[in-house]
Structure formats: C-alpha cells, structure tokens
Amino acid sequence: MALVGKKAPHFTAGAVLNGEEIVEDFSLSQYLGKKNVLFFFYPKDFTFVCPTEIHAFQEKSKEFEKRNTVVVGCSTDSEETHLAWLNTPKDNAGIEGVTFPIVADNSKVVAMNYGVLGGEYFFNNESRTWSFVGAPIAYRGTFLIDKEGIVRHESINDFPLGRNIDEYLRLIDAQLHVEEFGEVCPANWEEGQEAMQATTEGVSNYFSTN
C-alpha cells in the first residue's frame, strides 16, 4: 500500500554516521519538527549501481542542506559492512567521503514496513517452516518525508534502474513551494516558475498564460 499522505513508519536501528561512527539507536524521529528527510533504500553494499547513486546524493549534499533536508540511506547490510564500504576508496568502488547516515536494516523490517523488500516470507503450515521467495534485499525506494513526518512522495525502482538525484531536489522545491504559498505545481514545474491556485479559475489563468 502507498505511504503517501501517511506517517512514515517509525523505526530504531543501527546506523553509521559521518562515515565513521556506529550508533545502535538511529531514528528519523530526531528530525521531526526540524528537517525534511529524503530517505532512500538501495539493494546492497559493494555492488555496482549503488555507489554511483550514493556518491551522487553526497555530491548534492549542499543543495539538500539549502532546502532544510537531510539525506538518509538504508540497506539490509550490517553496520560493520556499511563501515567497511565507507572506508573503501571511490576508485575501488567504495563510498569513502560519504557523510550522511546509512541505516543497517539487518532484520529487513524497515524495508518491509516501507514496502520495498524485494520478496516475501511465506509460512508452510504442513512443514511448519518459513521460506522466502524473491530477493531478500531492498529495491531502490525513495521517500520524501516532511517535517511533520508525513510521506509526500515515494518511488520504487527495480534493482538495475538508478535514480535521478536532481528530480528529488525538484520535488523538494515543489513541496516547499506548496507549503509556503498554498499553490499547486504543474507538470515539469521548477523553482522560479509560475505555479497554480488550486481552483478552477487558477487553473484557467495558468493555461491562458502558458
């Protein structure tokens, strides 16, 4: 089920902060009332597409900061694996230099609650055993969560499909515009362009001038 318009699922989990510090009680709730959150899942550490995305998020860190937004990554790998990857140089396919938090979803519960786990658990009543069908790792899910903890955008890519980081900056701009001006943002809207009043008259005026 879609999470848009609902409270983002709460969790407390281990994470690596600033590329070097392991904590055991990381939660997005620390940002409530203070920051927007761009929370993204990726399939696995030490892979191919994932480091390109993670470095791309890091390269845009100042742009997210300007929008009062924190970036938080998550995969089903452990804190120790995250830390090892963070200590691996970029030219060795590592993510050294990344400073935003990376959550360790060892239990896969966070991925399940956000609807991005690449498979499902099944219980066999006859054998009284559990089995898993699919891939026990996260799809490339991305969630824009506002300061009140409400999910305003979600998207889920299959494993091979990398994200466009600039699109999330555009969506944050749109959300901030809606919050400040009470207007709605039409297709392909970007910061600085005309938006629309959420009325029939406002829509007519927009299309008569564009």
Image (cartoon, helix red, strand yellow):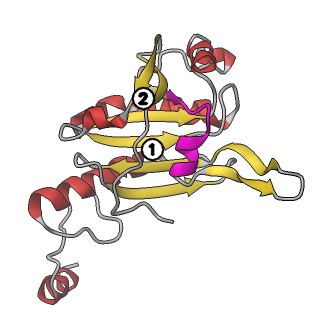
Residue in front for this viewpoint, 85 or 192: 85
Numbered tag placed on residue 35 in the rendering: none
Residue 18 within the segment the image draws in magenta = no
Residue 3 placement: quadrant? bottom left
Q: Which residue occupies 44% across, 57% down? A: 154
Residue 179 placement: quadrant? bottom left
| Image-based side of 105 in relation to 71, left or right | right
| Residue 86 position in % (x across, y down) | 56, 16
| Residue 67 position in % (x across, y down) | 23, 40
Q: What element carries label 2?
A: helix
Depicted 41 relative to depicted 192: above or below:
above
Residue at label 2? 59
Q: What is the three-letter code of the residue carrying label 2? A: Glu
Q: Are marks 1 and 2 in contact (CB under 8 Å)?
A: yes
Res 100 seen here: no
Residue in front for this viewpoint, 138 or 46: 138
In the rendered structure, which segment of residues is drawn in magenta? 103-113
Residue in front for this viewpoint, 95 or 91: 95
Q: What element carries label 1?
A: helix
Residue at label 1? 165
Q: What is the three-letter code of the residue carrying label 1? A: Ile
Q: Which residue occupies 33% across, 63% down? A: 5
Pointer 1 or 2: first along the chain = 2
| Residue 153 position in % (x across, y down) | 39, 58
| Cα gap from disc 1 to disc 2, whole angstroms | 10 Å
